[in-house]
Image: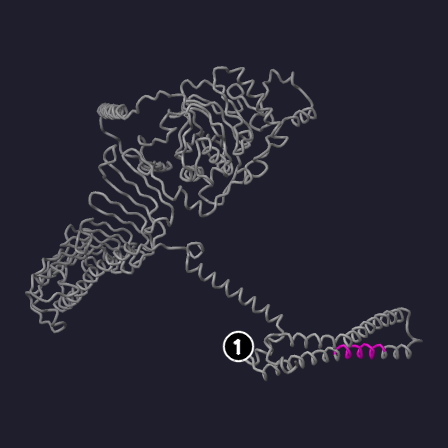
Amino acid sequence: DYSEYPESYKENTNKEKLILAYVENYRRQYVHLFRDRKPLFLNPLNECGIEKFVCTTLRPTLLSYKELYHWQGCAEFTADYLTMKQLEPPQELPLCLLSPSTILKRQLGNCFDFSNILCSLLLGAGYDAYVVSGYATKEICLTDESRQICPLLQPKEEVKKEAAKPEPRKYSVKPPRDLRSKFIIKMEARKKKEEEEEEKKKQQEEEDKIAELEKPPPDPLYGLRIHAWVLVRGGKREVPEDFFIEPFTGRSYPPSSTSFLGIESVWNHTNYWANMQNCASGCKDMSFDLMDTEKWEFMLAGSDQSQIEIPDAEEELYDMDDDEKENEDEKHLDMPASWVLPILVTKNQYEMRCPQGKKTILYKKAKLEKYANYLLKDGLVTRLSVYTNNELTDLNKVQEWYENREDKLVTRIHQDGLITEDFVEGRPRSLQQHLYKANNPGPEAERTMTFFHKARVDGLCKREETPAEITEHFINRDDFLYLRHVLFGKRQKKVAPATAEGTPRPILKITEKFHRNVSRPASEDVAEQVFVLHEDKIQVTYHREDPNITASTRDFFKPPNAEEKGGNLQWANDMTSTFQVNPHGAPSKNLSIYENLLMLIQTEQKSIQLVRVSEEEVRDILMDRQKEELASELAISVYDTERNEKAKKHRKELERLAMEEKLRRQEMEMDYLAPFLAQIGNPDKINKSQAFKLKEDCLADLKQRLIDKANLIQLRFEKETSELHKRQQDYQQKQVAMTKEDEEQYFNYCSEAMFRIHILELRLNRHKQMAPHKYMQLEQKLRQDQRLSAIHSIFG
């Protein structure tokens, strides 16, 4: 149906007809010069069957999404949003080139449609971009990425920062002389270099062998498959060098890539260029300097890209005045305005990205699945499955990315029977990463939890757990604790009724390690304390002083039930054993040792409680994770009014109340009975006495307002008259002494006062005439008002 398209789609302007004549002349010259080359892609048909120049189909557009300000975001959006359609037949140019708005609406297009939209977005973002018409390999034309590595699996290039060389100082210590044999050093370096070259050679041979095995079968249409892609030239937007963008996949390629076999022409929204270079060896030796007329033939001479610098030897032959140059420039035909509708992408369309919100891409030994935000209930947006074979049957690893989850989960990795979950900040217990076995996700199993230690009061950064051990690591604690290791024993089997919490694991040993506290002497600063519970023993190791190679230790042997005795513990000399590094140091007194033992007993009980708290925290985290996985709630911003049902209902309720209030006020403004109905409570039914009283009150109120208005006008009339009379008397008394200016001022006042008095007199007379009519009109309305129908019989 052509009626839905604007006039620019269904007909050509005079300027477009003129440019089509230029195109036809350009085509004839090209065919005459290059009879053995294929025709150029110049003026295909649009949706309405009208010929349009390809340059006018481009429309530079910058959309209001920050990701589309960079070429990576534009390429990824184009590749994801549209569905690829092959050229039929693959060795011939398409007959039609649809507008970008139509392609975005249908979400289906060929390589020229993809390139047209991508180039429009890149031009709008400020890139020097061009659509390229040429030839490519079968894998590129059919979007076969089964022999390419997934971009998510490619190692990121790390920029190595060179260490800053220290500035030479005038007075610096010279380095010691190298006394090694220079001949031996040279021979070792040569041997190492030969080994590295041999290793590189073997690695290259292995890679060549694998590449030969994975080489695609020969293509009968090799070099004949027509394809379109985008060229981005260096210079603008800090692009260092030219590169290609494959629109089907959004990947970038250097011009030397073997995937692109030749170029026929390039164009943007200002001009069109035909390639004059030999493409026998592909695009690697091509020059993309479009101002070089020996390698590129432009169509419109007036374009900024086609300005030719005349050689010095011919300057005298073409010497002309400035006026003649300006006249010559004015004769050049510029490009007509784009005939296509503006490129618009709504927020919902942009977030949906892929057709129906999902897309699957097959790579070498990998499968990538993409989903739109909020499409799946669990918030999954990307899933990468890695396999060990090319047939994608032996699954090795699955990595999932999530967004907008209430539990702050962002990634989950399944590999080798282990599950690794990563979270962002904002969880109740500051969990950052959780690593556990897939077949045993419950408590008291092998797991590793990493926490955001800055968000926790205890400074816990990592907790490692096995069925028999728990190891906790801390950072930046006030008590200098950095490690706590707990060793558990086996539970004893008891015949007793089952409880909800179960029997806790018996603790055999607790080891706590501390950093150095420089405010205390090293011999008194505890480095490690070990509570051996099953032996009633406490081992304390102090920090080592700098000149010493060993540290002082002290062992305590607790009497039975020492925790119950508390401060009433009886001291004995065999309860402690001390190793003091400094033999000349003063030994500790029994009182201080006794107090130290009491303090350690209390510390042991606190450590046991902290261990039980850690076990309880693990169980709570696992319980929370189980509930979160069952609920899979997604976080919705308060600004997202489309998805936020609560905000949407609240907004609709406010709109409904505002509309009702507006209608009520309108009714009250027009309803003459509203104030009197409010006085009697707005009853649903009105009896005769109420109706009669409403009628009398309403008429009495109107009568009083008419009288008040008449009195007000009469008061103003009398005031103006009195003021004028007073000024006239004053004038009669002072007439002889008054100046000319005073007389003129008096006459002006009299004229204005007489005008005001006349107006007030007219208003008063009109009011006296209209007052009975207004009273009768209100009385007639009250008789016809259905709410006062109860008194109709009285006046019938």
Indicate the position of residue 510 as horizontal and vertical percent values: 15, 58
Was residue 720 drawn as part of the magenta stretch in this picture?
A: yes
- Residue at disc 1, secondary structure: loop
- The residue identified by callout 1 is 684
Residue 331: image quadrant is top right
Was residue 422 drawn as part of the magenta stretch in this picture?
A: no
Residue 311: image quadrant is top right
Indicate the position of residue 574 as horizontal and vertical percent values: 5, 65
- In the image, residue 120 above or below residue 417: above
**Total numbered badges shown on the rendered structure:** 1
Indicate the position of residue 80 as horizontal and vertical percent values: 40, 39
Look at the image and tell me whether residue 182 can be seen.
no
Instruction: Report the side of 399 relative to 503 (left or right).
Output: right
- In the image, residue 467 above or below residue 733: above
Q: Quadrant of the C terminus?
A: bottom right
The extreme right residue here reads: 736
State the residue at coordinates (29%, 60%): 457
Compare residues 56 and 555 and report the one nearer the observer.
56
Instruction: Report the side of 719 relative to 683 (left or right).
Output: right
Indicate the position of residue 91 as horizontal and vertical percent values: 42, 23
The amino acid type of the residue labelled 1 equals Asp
Compare residues 532 and 646 and report the one nearer the observer.
646
For the stretch drawn in magenta, the main secondary structure is: helix
Chain part drawn in magenta:
712-724
